[in-house]
C-alpha cells in the first residue's frame, strides 16, 4: 500500500537559493519522500542525491573550500542531501552553496533536530524553509479512506500508531516486529551517537516511566529518584527525546489565576505505536486499562500534525488548578482561548467553573469518538 504524504509535492516548498530542511524521526519516511519526489522530476531537472553518511561528500561540504564546493555543485539544478546531520558544520557548507550558486535549490533531511538545527540555525538564517515530517497522519489517511473506514481502523491506530511501514502492513505480528525494531535499532541511535550518554538502559527506563504517565503531570525529581539519577540529568535526557522526535512537551497555562498550576509539564509520544512498543503492550483495546492514555496521546499528536500541516499557528498548553479542575488541551490562537477535554466515551462533561470565571470568552469542547475526526483532520 502506497501512502501519499502531505508534503509529496516538494515543488510547493522549494525556492531558489534557499535550503528546504526536512526534519523527522528515523523510519518516518523522509528518504521515501525524497525518492518519490525525485522520480516525478527525473528528466525535467538535473539533480544530485547524496547521503551525509558518504565520507567523500561530507569531506567536500565540510571543507569550506569555495572552489571544491562549486565543483561539486556545478551543472545541477537541485542538490539533495539525505541524513545531512551526519556532516559536521553542514550549515556552513549549505550557506556557501545557496550564496554562491545563482538559482540553485537545496534539500537537506535530518533525523535529529538537536544536531542538525544546531548546525544550520545561525548559518542559514533567512536562507531556509523548515518542514517536519510526522508519522502518517489521519489527514493523510483521509485522502485514502472515508470517515467510516477511519473509524473502523481506529483501534489499530491507537495500538500500532502511524509509522509508514506499520500502517502499510496488514499482519499484526509483523506490525509488532517493525515497532520493536524501531525501538531497539533506531529510537536511541542519534542520542547515543551524538551525546555523552553512558548507555541505553537508563534512557529506555526513563521512556517507560513517561509512557505510563502520558496525560499526567510529570515530576522530574520523582522520576530521578526512581531511576537513581539527579533531576538535572532527567531534564537533559527528556530534552534529547524532544529534540529527536520521541516526545512532545506540553506546559501548563496561566494568565491571571493564582490557583493555576504552571510549573510542571506533561509529555506525549510522537506515536502511539512507539509508546506501546516501549512498554511492550500491544494488547487489543478491550484488554487494556490505559485506553484513556492512548486516546489522549492519539488526539494530541494528531492535532499537532494538523496544526503543522494546516498552518494553524497556536500556543499549546494544558490547564489545571490546585483544586483539581483541569482541561486536557488548550490552544491560544489570535488572542483567543480554546479548551478541549478528551474523553474516550461520550460523557456529560461540564465546563470547569474556574475556567469560565477566569476566561469568560474562552471556548470549551469535549472531544470523543463522535466528533474526533473534525478535530484532527
Image (cartoon, rainbow, N blue to C red):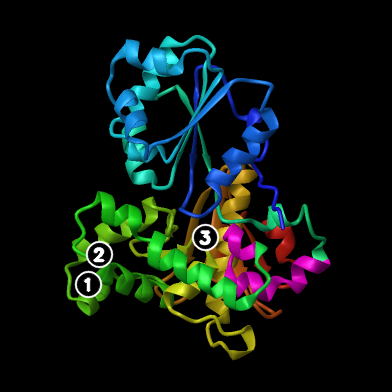
Give yes or no for residue 153 being in the magenta stretch.
yes
Local secondary structure at mark 2: helix
Left/right placement of residue 328 relative to residue 208 reads right
Local secondary structure at mark 3: helix
* Location of residue 144 by image quarter: bottom right
Left/right placement of residue 176 relative to residue 262 reads right
Give yes or no for residue 245 being in the magenta stretch.
no
Compared with 361, 122 (above or below) is above
Which residue is label 2 attached to?
Answer: 234
Compared with 10, 258 (above or below) is below
Camera-nearest residue between 85 and 130:
85
Q: Residue at x 60, y 29 (%)?
A: 13
Camera-nearest residue between 334 and 203:
203
CA separation in Å, label 1 and label 3: 35 Å
Which residue is label 1 attached to?
Answer: 224
Q: Position of residue 203 (x, y in %)?
A: 29, 67
Camera-nearest residue between 170 and 23:
170
Left/right placement of residue 185 relative to residue 226 reads right
Q: Which mark is residue 193?
A: none
Q: Mark 2 near mark 1, Cβ–Cβ under 8 Å?
A: yes
- Dominant SS type (magenta): helix
- In terms of sequence position, does the residue under pointer 1 or pointer 3 come before the other? 1
Q: Residues within 10 Å of mark 2 (few under 14, many from 20)?
A: many
CA separation in Å, label 2 and label 1: 6 Å
Residues drawn in magenta: 148-167
Q: Residue at x 60, y 39 (%)?
A: 35
Amino acid at each position: 500500500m502506497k501512502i501519499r504524504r502531505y508534503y509529496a509535492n516538494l515543488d510547493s516548498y522549494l525556492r531558489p537559493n534557499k535550503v528546504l530542511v526536512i526534519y523527522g524521526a528515523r523510519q518516518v519516511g523522509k528518504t521515501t519522500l525524497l525518492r518519490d519526489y525525485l522520480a516525478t522530476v527525473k528528466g525535467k531537472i538535473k539533480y544530485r542525491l547524496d547521503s551525509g553518511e558518504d565520507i567523500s561528500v561530507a569531506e567536500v561540504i565540510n571543507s569550506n573550500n569555495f572552489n571544491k564546493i562549486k565543483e561539486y555543485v556545478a551543472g545541477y539544478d537541485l542538490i539533495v542531501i539525505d541524513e545531512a546531520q551526519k556532516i559536521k558544520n553542514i550549515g556552513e557548507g549549505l550557506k556557501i552553496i545557496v550564496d554562491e550558486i545563482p538559482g540553485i535549490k537545496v534539500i537537506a533531511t535530518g533525523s535529529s533536530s538537536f544536531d542538525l538545527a544546531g548546525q544550520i540555525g545561525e548559518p542559514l538564517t533567512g536562507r531556509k524553509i523548515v518542514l517536519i515530517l510526522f508519522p502518517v497522519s489521519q489527514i493523510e489517511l483521509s485522502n485514502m479512506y472515508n470517515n467510516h473506514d477511519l473509524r473502523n481502523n481506529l483501534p489499530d491506530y491507537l495500538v500500532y500508531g502511524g509509522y509508514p511501514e506499520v500502517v502499510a502492513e496488514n499482519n499484526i505480528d509483523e506490525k509488532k516486529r517493525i515497532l520493536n525494531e524501531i525501538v531497539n535499532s533506531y529510537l536511541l541511535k542519534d542520542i547515543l551517537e551524538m551525546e555523552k550518554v553512558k548507555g541505553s538502559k537508563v534512557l529506555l527506563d526513563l521512556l517507560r516511566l513517561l509512557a505510563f504517565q502520558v496525560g499526567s503531570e510529570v515530576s522530574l525529581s520523582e522520576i530521578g529518584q526512581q531511576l537513581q539519577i539527579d533531576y538535572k540529568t532527567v531534564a537533559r535526557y527528556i530534552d534529547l527525546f524532544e529534540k529527536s522526535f520521541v516526545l512532545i512537551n506540553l506546559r501548563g497555562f496561566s494568565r491571571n489565576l493564582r490557583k493555576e498550576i504552571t510549573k510542571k509539564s506533561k509529555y506525549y509520544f510522537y506515536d502511539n505505536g512507539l509508546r506501546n512498543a516501549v512498554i511492550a503492550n500491544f494488547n487489543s483495546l478491550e484488554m487494556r486499562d490505559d485506553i484513556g492514555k492512548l486516546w489522549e496521546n492519539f488526539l494530541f499528536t494528531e492535532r499537532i500534525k494538523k496544526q503543522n500541516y494546516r498552518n494553524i499557528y497556536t500556543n499549546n498548553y494544558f490547564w489545571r488548578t490546585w483544586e483539581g479542575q483541569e482541561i486536557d488541551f488548550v490552544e491560544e490562537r489570535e488572542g483567543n482561548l480554546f479548551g478541549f477535554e478528551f474523553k474516550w466515551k461520550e460523557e456529560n462533561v461540564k465546563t470547569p467553573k474556574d475556567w469560565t470565571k477566569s476566561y469568560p470568552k474562552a471556548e470549551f469542547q469535549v472531544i470523543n469518538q463522535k466528533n474526533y475526526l473534525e478535530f484532527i483532520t
